[in-house]
Every structure is written in structure tokens, then in C-alpha cells.
Image (tube, rainbow, N blue to C red):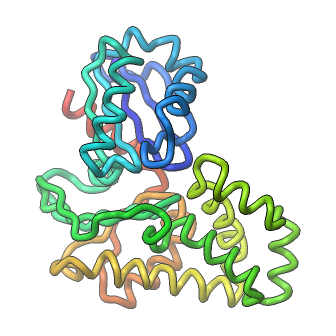
Amino acid sequence: MILIVDSGATKSDWIALDEKGDQLFLTQTLGLSPEVLTREVIEDRLANNFEISKNKEKVTRLYFYGAGCGTDRMKQFLTAIFKDFFPKAKTEVKEDTYAAIFATTKIGHQGIVCILGTGSNCSYYDGHQLFQKVTSLGYIPMDDGSGNFFGRKLIRDYYFHKMPQDLGMKFAKGYDLDADVIKENLYKQPNPNTYLATFARFLVENKDHPYCKGVIDKGFQQFVNNYIMQFELATKVPINFVGSIAYYLREELTTVLERNDLIVGVIRQRPIDGLVEFHKENL
């Protein structure tokens, strides 16, 4: 059995294939980012999924693409967990950028590949190798244009009284904005980045409001400035995206890209389907 996993900070998509490439099952767990989760939490999330737990002895190959897997230390941390949980599996752990690349860009083709979901990232793919200009320091200082970036912006503007009153009242009705609740989730509960990203749904649902338009535009422009424009070939190759923020705000994103003379490429919500096709071709 072959397991292919696309793991974001919020959720992980798992697809099992047999040796011929036929799908055996599709399932989900919560995100498995090693940057913000302990070994115990990750093991619990694996064990509590019926399909994964039931079939763990049958897995012979595991291809895991995950948020927070950009360093050797984090890759080794997850690999050790998977080695114990899937005892017969040969495991390969890569950062989620590779999932985005394989899902949007054919081998041999150049492109800049971006992730705009709970978090954000950007890489250049020369057709064979991945290159990054920016080393991620996680959701607190970075992640421009992401769900947690926009969620943090909304909360700050609400508390600093910078959000228009009509929108602020609507925001307060849709979320529990009690200060103690927010601090509990940010400082005591797991996945604070995922918690922040839940507020981005409000931005998507109200994207036509002038305030939201401004927040979206400035956030995407900041992502372009700090990430995409780091690459010399930025205006010469397609800019591809995966992630819910890129997908649900694709019109706004396209506007910003075209304003910067960038070539709009593929925009996918989830890379998992593209990943399956990639691995079927390389079985």
C-alpha cells in the first residue's frame, strides 16, 4: 500500500493507492505540522483515524508533504514518528512546497510556486530543482498573505478600533472575540496559527466591503513584494498557487499579480489530486 499525504497546518489529506495506482481509500486528519505539535499529539491524530490505524501494517511506502517540514530537524522528527507507526513503510518527508510544485508544474517546466493557505511560502522551480530565497521563521514574523496573516490583521484592527463600525458589529456576531478566549487559543491551545486562520473566512465572505478589499489587496501586495519579487525571473515565468486563500480570493489575487506584470499560472485549492497523478506516473 502506498500512502500520499498533503499536510497543511489545518488539515491533512491522505490517499491510499495499491501497487497498480488504484485508490484504496481517501481520508483526512487534522494538520501534522511538526513546528507546533508534540510527538504525542501527532501520534494521537494518526491513531484516532480509523482507516490509517487499521492499515498501518500494510503501508510499504509513505510520501508525506507537510507544512513545517522545511528543515532537516523537522523532517527527522516526523520520520521517526512514522517509522514507529508504519513499521513496514519506506518513508519520504518533504516540505509542502514540493506538493505545490508537483501539483501545478510539470517536470522540465519553470515556474514560481506559492502556497497561500493557513500559512504561506514561495519557491522557484527550474524544472528539476527547488530554490528558495526566504527561509520561513513561522507564522509570527512571516506568512504574508496567508490565512493566519489576515486573521491576525482582523483581530488587531477590531481591538485597535480601526475596523469600520458596521463591519466590526458583524465580525463580533460571527466570532467569540472575548479577550480571554482569544488569549487562551493563542497562548495555551495547540495550533494558534490555525486558530488565527479561522478568522480569514470573514474576509472571504465580506470581500466586497471596501475595508476588506483594502486588507486583501495590501496583504497580497506584501506577499508579492517580500516573496515573489525575490526571484530575478519573477516576471518571466508563470506564478502558480495552491491553498484555500489563493483559491477563494483568486480574482483579487489575479488583480494584484497582473498589476505587478506577473504571469498568472495555475491556482488550485488543494494539491492532493495533482500529487496522486504525479505519483501514479512515477510508480
Q: Is residue 100 left or right of residue 144?
A: left
Q: Quadrant of the N terminus?
A: top left
Q: Is residue 253 left or right of residue 262?
A: right
Q: Quadrant of the C terminus?
A: top left
Instruction: State the residue at coordinates (56%, 48%).
Output: 10
**Residue 152 at x, y = what percent?**
62, 71
Number of marks in the image? 0
Image: 98 above or below 245? above
Image: 227 above or below 39? below
Instruction: State the residue at coordinates (64%, 67%).
Output: 200
Instruction: State the residue at coordinates (52%, 58%).
Output: 118
Q: Is residue 192 left or right of residue 221?
A: right
**Residue 37 at x, y = what percent?**
50, 42
**Residue 109 at x, y = what percent?**
15, 59
**Residue 161 at x, y = what percent?**
77, 88
Q: Quadrant of residue 169?
A: bottom right
Instruction: State the residue at coordinates (30%, 88%).
Output: 261
